[in-house]
Image (tube, rainbow, N blue to C red):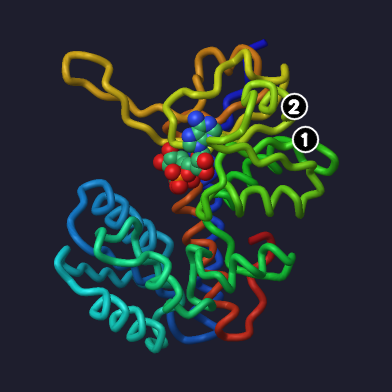
Amino acid sequence: MTAEIIDGKAFADALRAQVAGAVPAFVDATGRKPGLAVVLVGDDPASSVYVRFKGKATLEAGMESFEHRLPEVSGQAELVALVEQLNADDRVDGILVQLPLPGHMDDKAVIATIDPAKDVDGFHVANAGRLAVGEKSLVPCTPFGALALLKHRLGDLSGLEAVVLGRSNIVGKPMAQLLLQQNCTVTIAHSRTRNLPDVVRRGDIVIAAVGQPQLVRGDWLKPGATVIDVGINRIQIGDGKTRLVGDVDFDSAKEVAGAITPVPGGVGPMTIAVLLRNTLVAAHARHDLRAPEGL
Ligand code: NAD
């Protein structure tokens, strides 16, 4: 079998267009654009590229983008003061503090200072807790995007066996919560899981979010499984050249899976699209407006 390739880029483009299409009605209703503030501390090249992409995508969706860069040597108090200023700024509907923060800062303590209503990354404990108990919340972008791809491909997920590899607060745990809400039977596997290939083989759905290049091989999969590869890893391929690969060995997996996301072009583009979606949803909620249909 050769798997269907799930085109995350096309799906993300459609979601971004849907968000952009809903912005004018928000502007009509409120007299202002939705606004997203992104904060970057230091000049890590990868984070800097992400922040630039996010700013560009925000403007392309017709929203207002506020970019704040603090030097690497900034103190945590300075960052918290900036977050508090953004919490109080009526033009700002979403606040994203780009992670990881420099080693002298405490990610969790900083995230705790973001107003949960503006926490478009969905990392605040208030949003994580609401997700866990099944209340409306802002949901982390990457797992929300992965779920959208799954529903698009499979429709009703009820009763399916889902194996989530990875238990981070950013991807693995919220992914498992979302799948549970969809009535999947969910297994969370991690670095201490025994007989990982046997566990993965149970999955009608496999979500790989481990940060280990090409860990999941085709012979670990149930034939016909739907595989969502969240991993983004840069590997050396000789002559000083590098290549991006996922946490799944794409070449062997595509011979067994029913459908699979590629890396790049799978989950990655969904993350930014969902960030824009979350910003629009947060903006509506702040004005007691109903979120646009279908978002
Ligand atoms: P993390 O390092 O916080 O967590 C990794 C998890 O994988 C841990 O829970 C760990 O227990 C588990 N793990 C590690 N090695 C394992 C092994 N050999 N077997 C089984 N489990 C193992 O990582 P994260 O932030 O959750 O990110 C995971 C991957 O997803 C990374 O490659 C990251 O770059 C990527 N990512 C992509 C996006 C996107 O937009 N597509 C967003 C976030 C993260």
Q: How crowded is mark 1: few (under 14 residues within 10 Å), some or many (20 or more)?
A: many
Q: In which quarter of the image is the N terminus?
A: top right
Count of numbered circles in the view = 2
Q: Report x, y in % for residue 263.
A: 45, 30
Lateral position of residue 38 relative to residue 241, left or right: right
Q: Residue 161 carries which label?
A: 1
Task: Please state which amino acid type lies under the numbered disc 2.
Answer: Arg
Of pointers 1 and 2, the one earlier in the residue sequence: 1
User: From what the image shows, is residue 181 above or below residue 27?
Assistant: above
* Residue extending farthest right: 159
Q: Report x, y in % for residue 270.
A: 50, 47
Residue 237 showing in the rendered view: yes
Q: Residue 11 falls in which quadrant of the image? A: top right
Mark 1–mark 2 Cα distance, whole angstroms, equals 7 Å
Q: Residues within 10 Å of mark 2 (few under 14, many from 20)?
A: some
Q: Mark 2 points at which residue?
A: 202
**Residue, x 45% and y 29% (percent of image)?**
246
